[in-house]
Amino acid sequence: MRGDNLEDQIHSLRRLIERQSLRLEEKLTSLEDEVKEIKNRSPSGGGQANQGFIGDVYQQKGDINMEYLTDLEAKKASTEEDSVIESHKDFAEGLTIHGLSRIAAGGTAAKVLWTILVIASFIIAVLISKEHWSAFLEHDSRTSTKIVSQSKVPIPAITICDHTAIANERRRFSGEPPPVKRPTLVDFSIVDCARNLTACGYNGTTFVRVQNISANYARASPQNHLVKFDETTDCFTITGEVLEMPSDVLSYQAAADRRLSSNEWTELYVNSVDETFFESSEAVYWASEGFYYVNIEKKIITRLGLPFTECVDGSGPYSLNKFKGNYSVMKCQKGCFWEAVFEKCGQIPAMYKKHMRHPEKFANKTFVDDETGQACLSILENDHALTEKCDNLCELDPCYDEDIKLSLFHNPMKLDHFLELAFTFQSFLLEIVAEKPQYTWQDLFANFGGCLGLMTGSSILSIIELIIFFGLFFANFLRSKKKNNS
C-alpha cells in the first residue's frame, strides 16, 4: 500500500516537471520571437544595443531556469521527506504500544511528551511486577498440600524384632552366628493355641500367623508368604501386602509362653516398601502380650532441591549415607556413628555390615571378641563430641520422604500367651506435601506481560515491531547523513 502511494507521488512529480518544461519552452519561443521582431524594426546602428538586450534576455532565461530547478529540487526533497515521515507514521499507527504514532508524526513538543509518557508507563509496569521478579530471581518457594484418594494402599514394610535378641546382636563383634530361634509359621488358629499351648504342640518356639482380615473379622486369608526372615538377627519383615478396602486389617498373631522366655518386649519398625535397612526409622516398643490396633498414616513430602531448598536426592553422597537405599537423617547418623566405631574398634557388628553400600570398606582390621568390642563401643556411645559431629553432618532432609506415623491402641485381653498386631489404614486418603517455586518463568512472563500490556499496550509482538520501528528511524538518519556529506 505504501509502495503504491510512493509511485503515485513520483508520477505526479514527473507530470508537474513536464508541464513546467512546456511552459518554459513556450516562454522561450515567445522571447525569441520578440528578439526577431526587434531586429527587424531597429536600424543597423542599434545592433550593439540589440545584442546587449538579447544577452539580457538569455541571462534572464538562465536565471529563471536556475531558480525553477532549485525550487523543483527543494520540492522533490521535501516530497521524499514527507513520504518517509508518512511511511513511519503509517507503521506506527499499526503498533499496539500507545503513543508511538504521536512520537513518529508529531511536532517536537509532542515527540518529547509522548516519549516521556511511554517510558514512564514502562517503568511503572516494571515497578508493579517488581515483587514477581524478586521472587523468581531469589528462588522463593511455597508449600502446597493436597489430599489424594487411592483405590488401594500398600502396607509399609513391617519389621518385628525380639527386643532382647536384637539388643545382643547390636553388640556382637565376634562374627559368630547369633543364637537365633526363629518363630514357626503356622496356619491353625493362634487364639485357640494360646488357650492351650500343649494341645497345639508348643515346644518353646513362638507360633506366628500372618493374615488379611476384613474390618468386621468375617473374612480372613493367610499371608504367611509375606514373611521374610533376617539372616543376622532375630527379626523378620512383613512386606508386599496391599489393602483394597479401608479398615481392612493385616494381622500378625503370635502365641508363646512368655514365662519361659526373656522376650517380654518387642520392637517394631515401619518403613517404606523399598527400604531394606529397618533401623532407618525409629523403633516402637510394646509388651509382647495383648491386642494392639495399629493405625497407619502416610504422608509424602517432596522438596525441590537447590537453588530452592538444600536437600539430599536419592541415596545421596557416600559421605552422608553409608547404607543402601535412599538417604534419611537416621541412616546418616547411624552411618556416621558406625564408621567411627570401625575406625576406633576395628570391627562393626555383622547386622550393620551387610546393609552398607561399600561393605568392603568395613572389612575386619583385626579379630575383635565381643567383650573387647563392647568395651570400645561403650566409650563411643558416651562420646558427646561424636554425637554432636554426626548431628551436624546430618542436618539435611531428603528431597523425597515418606513420613509414616503409627497410632497404637492397646487392649490387654484376658488371654495369656497371645499377641496380635492389627495394622490398618482407616482412610485411603494420602496427604502429599510438595515444595513448588513461588514463581516459575511461565508465571513471571504472564504477570509481567499483563502489567506491561496494561500500562503500554505492548506484547512480545510489540517488541519485534518496536525494533523494526526504530530501525526505520535509524536507517533514515544514516541516509540523511550520507546525503548531507555528499
Image (cartoon, rainbow, N blue to C red):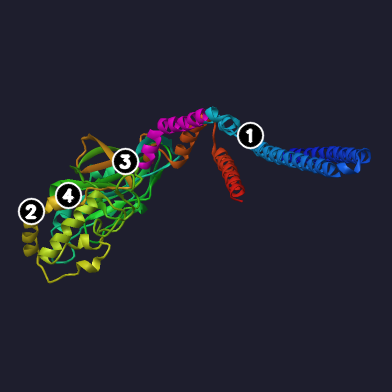
Apparent side of residue 61 relative to residue 354 in the rendered image (left or right)? right
- Amino acid type of the residue that numbered disc 3 sits on in the rendered structure: Phe
Evaluate if marks 1 and 3 touch, with contact meaning CB atoms under 8 Å apart.
no
Q: CA distance from mark 1 to mark 3?
A: 79 Å
Which of discs 3 and 4 lies nearer the camera? The answer is 4
Q: Residue 89 got which mark?
A: 1
**Label 2, residues with CA under 10 Å away: few <14, some 14-19, many ≥20:** few
Rendered image quadrant of residue 325: bottom left
Q: Residue 391 got which mark?
A: 4
Out of 384 and 3, give the one closest to the viewer: 3
Rendered image quadrant of residue 80: top right
Q: Secondary structure at mark 3?
A: strand
Apparent side of residue 84 relative to residue 327 in the rendered image (left or right)? right
Magenta stretch, main secondary structure class: helix
Q: CA distance from mark 1 to mark 4?
A: 71 Å
447, above or below 221, in the image: above
- Is 313 included in the stretch rendered in magenta? no
Range covered by the magenta-colored residues: 112-138
Residue identified by numbered label 2 = 383
